[in-house]
Image (cartoon, helix red, strand yellow):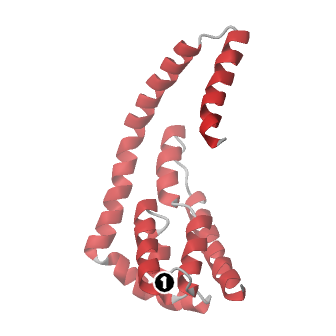
Amino acid sequence: MANYIIPIFIICVLIFSLIKKINAYECFVSGAKSSIDLCINTFPYLVAIFAVVELLSISGISAYLTQVCKPIFNLFKIPSELVEFLILRPFTGSGSIAMLSNIFATYGPDSYISKCASVIMSCSETTFYVVAVYFSTTKIKKLRYIIPLCLLSAFIGSVIACLFCRIL
């Protein structure tokens, strides 16, 4: 059934465009043209995020932040093995996946730490990446409350995730 969803969707769009007398090909080409502009406009923001992530890793700042934040995370019963993962998660999705894979290899997929990391991975977002991509296209520049609230909600979600993993 899953193999037929996209072709059925395309056929439905084409039938709808015939009924409404819309030139589907022109609409597709117009959308493709605007997506090129979108890529060009968001590229500098993406490069900035990737550069920050790499600089955090190479400079040792992420290791320093891990040591500074361990007592705070331990206060909320988040395992200290997940501190670096939690610090990196708002910046990069692929880096988080790599760290999640490393956590699985180190502690095993059924361990408490791995379960917590899995739930945190699925219930949190790469905040800075999302802000860079979405807000660069909408031209919103006043991000005074957005980023702190996103980071706070990710932290609260992480605390609740570890609590649920501890209970279950």
Quarter of the figure with residue 122: bottom right
Residue bearing mark 1: 108
- Give the answer, above or below, for where 88 lies relative to 104: above
| Residue 8 point in image, percent of width and height | 66, 29
Give 128 or 86, whichever is nearer the viewer: 86
Looking at the rendered image, the quarter that the C terminus falls into is: bottom right
Crowdedness near tag 1: few (<14), some (14–19) or many (≥20) residues, C-alpha within 10 Å: some
- Number of numbered markers: 1
| Residue 131 point in image, percent of width and height | 51, 52
| Residue 82 point in image, percent of width and height | 49, 82
Q: Which amino acid does label 1 sit on?
A: Gly
- Give the answer, above or below, for where 76 lies relative to 102: below
Per the image, label 1 sits on a secondary structure element best described as loop
Q: Residue at x 64, y 22 (%)?
A: 11
Q: Which residue is drawn at 42% across and 80% down?
A: 105
Q: Which residue is drawn at 60% across and 39% down?
A: 3
Q: Which residue is drawn at 42% across and 29% down?
A: 37
